[in-house]
Image: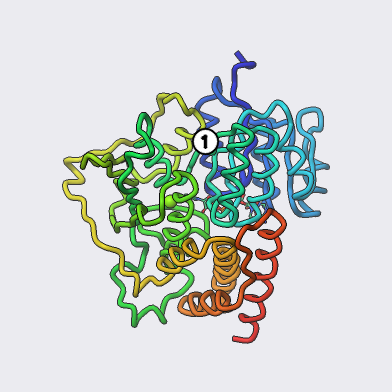
Amino acid sequence: MSSKKKQLAILGSTGSIGTQTLDVVKNNPSLFKVFLLSAHSNHMLLFNQAKKFKPKYVVINTAVGYDFLKKNLNKKHTKVFFGAAELEQLVTEKDINLVVNGVVGSAGLMPTVCAIKAGKNIALANKETLVVAGQLIMNLAKQHNVSVLPIDSEHSAIFQCLVGEKNENIHKLILTASGGPFLSVKKSDFKYITVKKALKHPNWNMGPKISIDSATLMNKGLEVIEAYWLFNVSMEKINVIIHPESIIHSLVEFCDGSTKAQMGVPEMTTPILYALSFPKRIPYKTDVLNLAQIANLSFLKPDFKKFPHLKLAYDVLKMGGTAPCALNAANEVCVEAFLNKKIKFIDMIKIIEKSLENFIFVAQPKLDDYLYVDHETRQMVNNLISRS
Ligand code: NDP
Ligand code: MG
């Protein structure tokens, strides 16, 4: 019955996570209904999605996109809104049951805050939200009795391993990392890395920003911080292991020596579906593991010298306060500059490290402090880039 359907607000519907979330919805029309879709600039794709899924609202961030959608969408089915401020209002609508956040970058923070304050459960792919303001988000979620359900595959794996377990029995969280496209490239050859090569992830097909983060291993660093806030364990208990096949999505070691792992083919629809259907599991047609064909799984220790981004994430987590927020902002600006060919692959870490010598540290930040530090760090890093 339609009243039983979970009504979804899908933020970043035009991205890799957003489109895969819509695939899950398309394949489960009796369970899910799209209430709201939001995108940044890709108004043509948003238009096609709106025609197909008939959401009550769409939100777009460009004036040209807004005009196009206003003109071409049937307003009997779908109302069109413009920009971040409207989105922050719309995510609080009473009919929304779950907000799926597939936005990239710290732009995902404010709609998450607004949705949590309105008591909405969050299916979170946007890891930057937790990296920037993990403490604030988890406190708000507790205060408003809201679930933050991870979509990131490693965190979904840990979340699944922890069902029925007690937090005090966790000995270690072990995040797996594919190692990215440059796992076996010599550090001395990193100076030759091009944007095209860095975008070519061996196992996953993702948006450009997370693909570059996977190539530097910053993605794993951000995920360490994400795990810290989601699972409430000390940072010493969060470990990373390189597992090039991306079959084990992460593991939890318990105090009695037992280790649980969650496995599956490297496909985001599985963790998306889990977050959408939790606490239930629902049947879904997808590829399953053929272990005999896979035959071997391999593991190795991460090389912190070769991939200093990962070490930096542990460092800022230890510093606390606004340090992870500053790291995230510096990284976002550097990744964009690398994608636009303004700086080289090896420049990213130098500029990020330089910016962390001089960022604004607030030990007990409030929301405004995070927004201020995010803004100021971006400006500082842009200056560093234009001078480099
Ligand atoms: P994409 O780049 O593919 O998509 C990003 C989405 O966010 C698009 O819909 C884009 O709109 C929108 N967007 C971009 N900038 C803004 C902005 N300033 N304000 C509002 N919306 C914006 O990214 P992914 O889907 O790959 O990643 C999304 C998030 O999920 C990231 O945080 C990533 O780390 C995380 N994640 C992704 C995985 C994956 O497999 N892709 C796996 C695990 C986590 P438009 O395209 O219309 O401009
Ligand atoms: Mg991940």
- Residue 109 % position (x, y): 64, 51
Residue pointed to by mark 1? 23
Determine the residue positioned at 34% across, 46% down.
249
Q: Residue furthest top?
A: 1
Q: In which quadrant will I find the N terminus?
A: top right
Identify whether 386 is placed above or below 292.
Answer: below
- Residue 220 % position (x, y): 42, 58
Task: From the viewer's side, name the closer residue of 107 and 376.
Answer: 376
Determine the residue positioned at 28% across, 69% down.
184
Identify whether 242 is placed above or below 71.
Answer: below
Secondary structure of the residue carrying tag 1 is helix
- Residue 108 % position (x, y): 63, 50
Residue 317 is left or right of residue 49, and the answer is left
How busy is the neighbourhood of tag 1: few (under 14 within 10 Å), some, or many (20 plus)?
Answer: few
Identify whether 201 is placed above or below 16.
Answer: below
Determine the residue positioned at 74% across, 35% down.
57
Determine the residue positioned at 64% across, 34% down.
144
